[in-house]
Image (cartoon, helix red, strand yellow):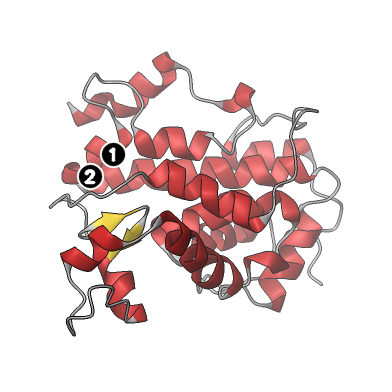
Amino acid sequence: MFKLQRPLSFLDVNRFVGPLPRLLKLGDVMQTVRQIAEDIVAREGGFVDDPDDPGGATKYGVTIHTMRRLGLDLTGDGAVDVADVRLLTRQKAVDIFVQHYFDKPRVSSLPNVLHASVFDMYVNAGSQAVKILQRLLRDMGFNVAVDGVIGPKTAAACVSAAQPDPSTLRDAYGIARRNYYFRLADRRPALRKYAQSRSGGKGGWIKRAEEFLSHRYHMSDDAFQRRVEAWD
């Protein structure tokens, strides 16, 4: 197991990603994997076919590309197309997420405190969810490859990094995830509508990342406006 010379402290992570809250709210409740998947489906919403979204036609967060890869010909016409996406049920979407976005990439091998956020990000961005985590671990001093695969070294590094306060690692990952969205929008103007709403406030990507952050580390409206002012 890879370990820092001393346990990861609040101040250690503060150096990498900024001031972080120390504790989860006492009211936080552990969820089952299926409950997390159901939350993701609710967050993703129904059918959309946005030309700016590289995922193409999507329903409940399941893209047409995923359905083609899995061979989900729901109409039975021999081809997986938009009509099949429209027929996808919420229950089937939950099943897909649990099997292919939680079990298959071995999210369960990470500390429990990371399950919801990494699972949600894997649905949203595939293996980038793991690469974000691995880059964070490298910044913290762990010798892990940034390959998007949760192997024994990545899992062991996370177990060590989660000590003594698991919520610190959770928040560090949430901030790294939010920064990933900002950088993506910096590079690709067409995607900025996902990070900034039409009214100029936080867009869906940023709100989504902050759902997994302790409240005191949500960006203020002023801080958000300063971050995106160059987009105008």
From this viewpoint, which residue is outermost toward the bottom?
78
From this viewpoint, which residue is outermost toward the top?
222
Indicate whether 6 appears above or below 232. below
Which quarter shows the N terminus? bottom right
Amino acid on which the number 1 mark rests in the picture: Tyr
| Residue 232, percent from left and from top | 17, 26
- Element type where label 1 sits in the image: helix
Amino acid on which the number 2 mark rests in the picture: Leu
In this view of the protein, which residue sits in the foreground, 72 or 29? Answer: 72
In this view of the protein, which residue sits in the foreground, 104 or 184? Answer: 104
The 10 Å Cα crowd at callout 2, few under 14, some 14 to 19, many 20 or more, is some
| Residue 97, percent from left and from top | 49, 63
| Residue 194, percent from left and from top | 28, 39
Q: What residue lies at 36% left-to-right and 79% top-to-bottom?
A: 70
Residue 194, labelled with which disc?
A: 1
Q: Is residue 17 visible?
A: yes
Are the two marked residues, 1 and 2, in contact with CB atoms closer than 8 angstroms? yes
Residue 86 falls left or right of residue 179: left
Identify the residue under disc 2. 191
From this viewpoint, which residue is outermost toward the front?
76
Residue 152 falls left or right of residue 26: left
Indicate whether 101 appears above or below 152. above
Q: What residue lies at 72% left-to-right and 49% top-to-bottom?
A: 113
Q: Is residue 55 visible?
A: no
In this view of the protein, which residue sits in the foreground, 230 or 21? Answer: 21
Q: Quadrant of residue 133 in the image?
A: bottom right
